[in-house]
Image (cartoon, helix red, strand yellow):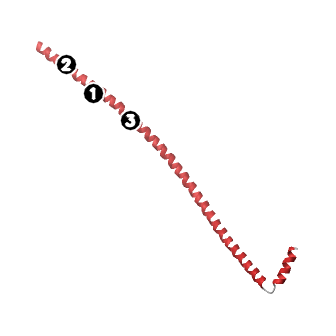
């Protein structure tokens, strides 16, 4: 009976030691699980924030692309008008040059005295 009591006490002590070890492991694992859960929540928050930032940037990019397209169209129109203006200026310059040449020819012609008289009459 004494041996049995001793063995029983020994087994109980071993079980108590194992129980204490398991409780420590359980506490350690619970702490690690809590930390992992906290990190998981932080990662989820970061992913959500990242998604929101990406969405905002995509929206801004779409807006900028539309504005860029509009500006490119306006620039094209302005360039076309500028080219048309340059052509008109060139034509006007050529016309003025031709008129100046004709006036020079008339001044050097036999009609110069008559042209002078007409010019004086117009001024008066």
Front one among 109 and 9:
109
How busy is the neighbourhood of tag 2: few (under 14 within 10 Å), some, or many (20 plus)?
few
Q: Is residue 72 above or below residue 3?
A: below
Front one among 45 and 88:
88
The outermost residue toward the top is: 2
SS assignment at label 1:
helix
- Residue 23 is left or right of residue 91, and the answer is left
User: Residue at image x 33%, y 31%?
Assistant: 32
Q: Earlier in the sequence, mark 3 or mark 1?
A: 1
Residue for badge 1: 25
Front one among 3 and 83:
83
Residue 75 horizontal/vertical position (percent): 60, 61
Residue 106 horizontal/vertical position (percent): 78, 83
Q: Earlier in the sequence, mark 3 or mark 2?
A: 2
Q: Is residue 32 above or below residue 85?
A: above
Tag 3–tag 1 contact (CB < 8 Å): no
Residue for badge 2: 13
Q: CA distance from mark 3 to mark 2?
A: 39 Å
Residue for badge 3: 39
């Amino acid at each position: 009976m004494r041996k049995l009591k001793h063995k029983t006490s020994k087994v109980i002590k071993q079980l108590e030691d194992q129980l204490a070890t398991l409780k420590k492991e359980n506490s350690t694992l619970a702490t690690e699980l809590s930390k992992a859960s906290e990190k998981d929540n932080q990662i989820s928050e970061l992913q959500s924030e990242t998604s929101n930032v990406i969405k905002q940037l995509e929206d801004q990019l779409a807006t900028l692309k539309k504005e860029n397209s509009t500006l490119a169209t306006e620039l094209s129109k302005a360039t076309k008008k500028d080219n048309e203006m340059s052509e008109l200026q060139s034509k006007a310059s050529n016309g003025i040059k031709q008129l100046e040449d004709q006036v020079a020819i008339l001044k050097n012609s036999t009609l110069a005295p008559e042209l002078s008289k007409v010019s004086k009459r117009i001024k008066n």
